[in-house]
Amino acid sequence: MRDGRGRLAGIVLASLAATEAAIQAGRALFHGKQGIDLAPPYLAAKLLLRGDQRFYDDALVGWTGSALGVHGPAGPGDAVLNFIYPPWVPAAYAPLALLPWGVARVVWFLISAAATVLALLVLARATADDAEEERELSRAALFGAAFFFPLFYGLMTGQANAVLLLLVAGSLLALGQGRALLAGLLLAPAALAKPFLAFPALVFLARRAWGALGGLLVGAGVLVLVGVTVGGPRAWPAFWSRISIHNALRTYEPRNHSLAAAALAFFGPGGDVQPVVAAPALAAPAALAGAAIAGVLVLLALPLRSRVAANPALGFGATLALGLLLTPKSWEHYGVFLLPGFLAAYAAFRDGEQPPPRMALVLLGASFSVWAFSLVSREEYAALVSRPFSLLLASKTAATLVLLGLLAWAARRRGASSRGAS
């Protein structure tokens, strides 16, 4: 009877997740802003196919977009967003740029959706200890992802997050299987596309996986050379200048969930948000204090010298969370890179002979729920601009810190279990 009830509950939950995923994917595909972040690399690839290396000329990219009917976030007539990606990226998007814009963004959406599912399955395999656990974690990952707003937000904007998540997942799996060089090679393009994705290299360092670090350096070196070939000798300096300007943060900005953004929401200065405490001088110290706390938690989550063979999933999850916290402009859709941490924490707490700590499960569910369900619409942010409600603008930053704490807790718990067993 219990088995029958369990199957019935599984069918209901699966239909619930499938329906939610279909609805959210449909909204992402047909949204008026669909593909706004895909447009810059698509247009840069168009320029590359024409033999033009001026990817960082905003006026030229905007004019190219207008000629093709590609517009920015505000709709027709609005210039496309500027190109802020490394100079090797146009070569990666060149096949997509062979297609008309309307076709290209649908194809990219389908590629991204497929890459998301594959990444979740790879994460489950990389995190699980056996085939049975892999099946259970696969179901858990797919079910959770069906309700995870940052994932669908990234699909709507046309971000490359899904492909990058697949590379990160592949790197984790390769490292766990002892293929260190491949782990580094897979992480390299992710790290050079979004620099905060380089943080899992700390796991390579902690595990003394010198082959993985070597693969990362080799892969990065190849991409640097590709960038010079594609964009010319001045392309990399232009990129670093552009990305530095882009990451400059002076006031709180909605959908930014970094430690720096949280500190600005708490203390100011300026912007449309009323800080909880109007003390601009405290913003930088608060962000630094948060970074110090996050750093300690990551050190606790990384594998100890005595546990070099331990599953690296906890370390990957923790370092990715650290990257999101430290990046000055950590946008909403970056939250998809917290999924490895959520899955690793869930797997670690359910593992072992002892029942999982209830408090850990409560905190894990709360952290996931904040990222999945809160601060979704623009109206939610607008409702929190006045004090003391502006305190809630830092909810997702706080949820990331909670996840980091849980990963550290899980690592200590697993370490204690390993010592007890020995």
Image: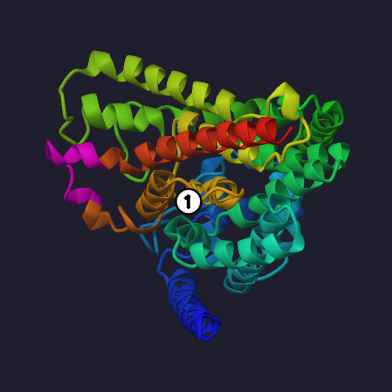
Range shown magenta: 381-392
Query: Residue 114 location in percent, x, y?
Result: 66, 68
Residue at the spot 39% in from the left edge and 29% down from the top edge: 259
Query: Residue 274 location in percent, x, y?
Result: 15, 33
Residue at the spot 84% in from the left edge and 46% down from the top edge: 177
**In the figure, 337 relative to 243: above or below?**
below
Residue at the spot 81% in from the left edge and 29% down from the top edge: 209
The residue under label 1 is: 333
The image quadrant of residue 131 is bottom right
Could you tell whether 69 is left or right of 289 in the image? right
Crowding around mark 1 (Cα neighbors within 10 Å: few <14, some 14 to 19, many 20+) is many
Magenta span includes 385: yes
The image quadrant of residue 249 is top left
Label 1 sits on a secondary structure element that is helix
Q: Visible in this render: residue 359?
A: yes
Q: How is the image coloured?
A: rainbow
Magenta span includes 288: no
